[in-house]
Amino acid sequence: MKTYRIAVLVAAAVLCVSSAHAQKPKVVILATGGTIAGAALKPTDPGYKSGAVGVDVLIDAVPQLKDIADVSGEQIASIGSQDMNDEVWLKLAKRVNELLASPDVDGIAITHGTDTLEETSYFLHLVTKSDKPVVLTGSMRPSTAMSADGPLNIYNCVAIAADPQARGRGVLVLIDDDIHSAHDVIKRHTTDVATFTSGEAGLVGVSLFGAQTWYRTPAQVHTAKSEFTIAADQATLPRVDIIYAHANMSPDLITAAAVNGAKGIVIAGVGDGNMTAPAWTELQRVAKEGVVGVRSTRTNGGITRRNIEVNDDQGGTVASMELNPSKARVLLQLALLKTSDAKKIQDYFNRY
């Protein structure tokens, strides 16, 4: 009888272990290149080649991933994110939505360069059609560097993608233990490991060696509730240019952008989205010709509201609200797939 009981207990233990293994969350890592996949000739070399390391190598470098998730990887691109483009965005978005539509996939982790990570994450924030976690990460040091920050970022990124509590919070960015909303995150420093911040909005949470503490859920419309969709045959996005405002700003660049095919123009304005009087006159002129003008700010902080120092109603322009120029460009590209009506586009900026 005693032998029988021992056998039953052993069988139960094996069953529990097998069940726990079977229930491990399924996370797919989509790699796009960047510094996190970069390689240099020696550990202290400040120069390196972005995107030199494949996704399988990144996964193998963090064997602890198998303890928190059933992980697989796919290579979407192998570029530095300064070369990120609409083609890769569309490919990435389509693959994210394909994977998340499967009941076998619990979350997506994306490795990405830091230069345009805030733009890619916000694009996915607007076009992902699922509440399942989508989490982007990168690194400020290449994979071959002394004290490389990539491996722990990947580990925490996968842990968040596997965390049921991450669901419904929109697309997230994990870097240096901090969890940001794609809506708010910006890069603030050229080389600092702690380069990302969420400004006044604050963090969504933190991750410490794969254990999350959650602070908030972003209030803006995103992911499953978003009106923006990428069609299967979508091959391009409307051209939108960003023009940086400064003292003695000439209107010529606004004219040139419109002449060369821009469907929208975002002004990285001084202060509260301002620009010189000649530039403002020209922005109103091209708006009358159907080019949507959006006023944002180069300060990377605060809200650019309508009709504060200039009359957007009269000028036919849009105020970017909480979005900095790079994110305003992303939203405007998607909005232009639906309409060129400035009033309708303003509504998108108010809600997204």
Image (tube, helix red, strand yellow):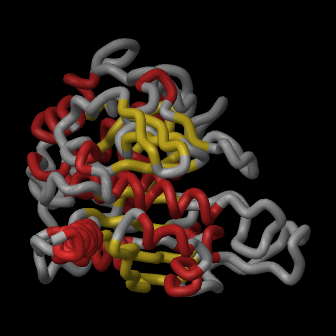
Q: Quadrant of residue 257?
A: bottom left
Closest to the observer: 328 or 103? 103
Q: Position of residue 330 (x, y in %)?
A: 34, 53
| As drawn, 321 above or below 285 | above
Residue 93, compared with residue 121, is above or below; it is below
- In the foreground, 68 or 250: 68
In this rendering, the count of numbered labels is 0
Residue visible at 58% across and 85% down in the picture: 57
Give the quadrant of the N terminus: bottom left
Depth order, front residue of 89/68: 68
Residue 250 as seen in the image, left or right of residue 239: right
Q: Is residue 19 visible?
A: no
Residue lying furthest front in this view? 1
| Residue 301 relative to residue 26: left or right | right
Q: Residue at x 46, y 76 (%)?
A: 31
Given the current orientation, which residue lies at the most extreme top position? Answer: 308
Q: How far across and how far down the image is residue 329, in percent?
A: 37, 50
Look at 49% across and 55% down and name the residue there. 156
In the rendering, at what x and y percent does residue 280 appear? 42, 32
Instruction: Using the rendered image of the protein, determine whether residue 151 is visible from the camera's viewpoint.
Output: yes
Image coordinates of residue 129 in percent, x first then y, are 13, 59
Q: Is residue 275 above or below residue 143?
A: above
Above or below, 316 relative to 286? above
Q: Nearer the viewer, residue 266 or 148?
A: 148
